[in-house]
Image (cartoon, rainbow, N blue to C red):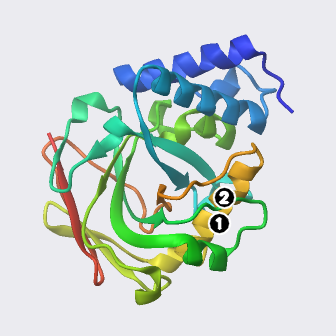
């Protein structure tokens, strides 16, 4: 159940979305609303999504966050969070990301699954996901919390669209059966220097379990993953802070590279 009124949810959604659109920090909202529930937090996120759509933006995908067991333990949470991806979050591979539009961005290497059949929870598991997946492709997420110093709790980050801000997809598409998703290796370079290494198993033991969890979390709101959905599965590597002028290139075993530059 929620503890916030419809008006409070709308006001908090505007508060967080204004911070995103105008690139300024705010304090975590649970400081002022300690009684807010997880349902309230998701209600705020869905209200931000609704207001973007009302202004003519398209929702082009979904993303999962906090998808490593270590990260969940560190945050004291038992499940990851999700967010939506709006059309203007998308940056072409090799493209430029305007740093002034963001607050304190970090880069994460991820993978994206694109579905060919709907996934309707509860009870979705890895096998269902692999069967419903059209292809997998490399994707890099630029996360950017609206909260001061990137400090938040799970309810606050859910409300803030799970720190979504920009993403770059590229490389090569492949069918899931042609990949060893657990052992798929990833190397992140910033300005030509290797800064992170990872493998697919960093995401909940298997990248497809992230998509299964998304379907099951959406089911709690009577929502599902439609066919043709682009889903970023969460970080395979730790998030790396970037500055103006930095370029990144992420190499994926057998799937090419994704790159971009902060200007």
Distance in Å between CA atoms under marks 2 and 1:
5 Å
Mark 1 lies on residue: 212
Is 211 displayed left or right of 197 in the figure?
Answer: right
Q: Is residue 56 above or below residue 214?
A: above
Q: How many marks?
A: 2
Mark 2 lies on residue: 215
Residue at (40%, 24%) from the top-left corner?
56
Quadrant in the picture for residue 39: top right
> Which x, y percent locates residue 95?
16, 49
Label drawn at residue 119: none
Mark 1 Cα shell of 10 Å, populated few (<14), some (14-19), many (≥20) = many
Q: Say if residue 27 shows up in the picture.
A: no
In the rendered view of the protein, which quadrant contains the N terminus?
top right
Residue at (54%, 17%) from the top-left corner?
15
> Which x, y percent locates residue 119?
64, 62
Is 192 displayed left or right of 178 in the figure?
Answer: left
Looking at the rendered structure, the secondary structure element under dot 1 is helix
Looking at the rendered structure, the secondary structure element under dot 2 is helix
Residue at (67%, 62%) from the top-left corner?
213
In the rendered view of the protein, which quadrant contains the C terminus?
top left
Residue toward you, 4 or 89: 89
> Which x, y percent locates residue 96?
16, 44
> Which x, y percent locates residue 2?
82, 28
Quadrant in the picture for residue 21: top left
The reply to whether dot 2 and dot 1 touch (C-beta < 8 Å) is yes
């Amino acid at each position: 159940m929620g503890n916030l009124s419809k008006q409070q949810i709308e006001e908090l959604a505007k508060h967080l979305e204004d911070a995103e659109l105008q690139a300024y920090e705010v304090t975590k909202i649970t400081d002022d609303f300690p009684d807010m529930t997880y349902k309230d937090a998701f209600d705020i996120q869905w209200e931000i999504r609704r207001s973007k759509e009302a202004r003519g933006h398209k929702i082009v995908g979904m993303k999962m966050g906090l998808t490593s067991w270590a990260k969940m333990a560190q945050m004291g949470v038992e499940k990851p969070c999700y967010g939506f991806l709006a059309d203007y979050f998308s940056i072409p591979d090799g493209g430029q990301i305007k740093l002034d539009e963001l607050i304190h961005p970090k880069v994460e290497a991820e993978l994206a699954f694109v579905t060919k059949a709907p996934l309707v929870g509860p009870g979705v598991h890895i096998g269902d996901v692999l069967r419903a997946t059209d292809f997998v492709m490399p994707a890099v997420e630029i996360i950017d919390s609206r909260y001061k110093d990137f400090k938040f709790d799970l309810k606050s980050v859910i409300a803030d669209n799970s720190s979504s801000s920009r993403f770059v997809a590229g490389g090569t598409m492949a069918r899931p059966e042609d990949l060893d998703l657990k052992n798929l290796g990833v190397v992140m370079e910033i300005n030509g220097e290797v800064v992170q290494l990872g493998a697919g198993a960093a995401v909940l033991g298997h990248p497809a379990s992230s998509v299964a969890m998304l379907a099951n979390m959406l089911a709690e709101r009577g929502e599902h993953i439609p066919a043709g959905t682009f889903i970023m599965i969460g970080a395979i590597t730790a998030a790396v802070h970037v500055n103006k002028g930095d370029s990144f290139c992420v190499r994926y075993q057998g799937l090419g590279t994704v790159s971009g530059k902060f200007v």
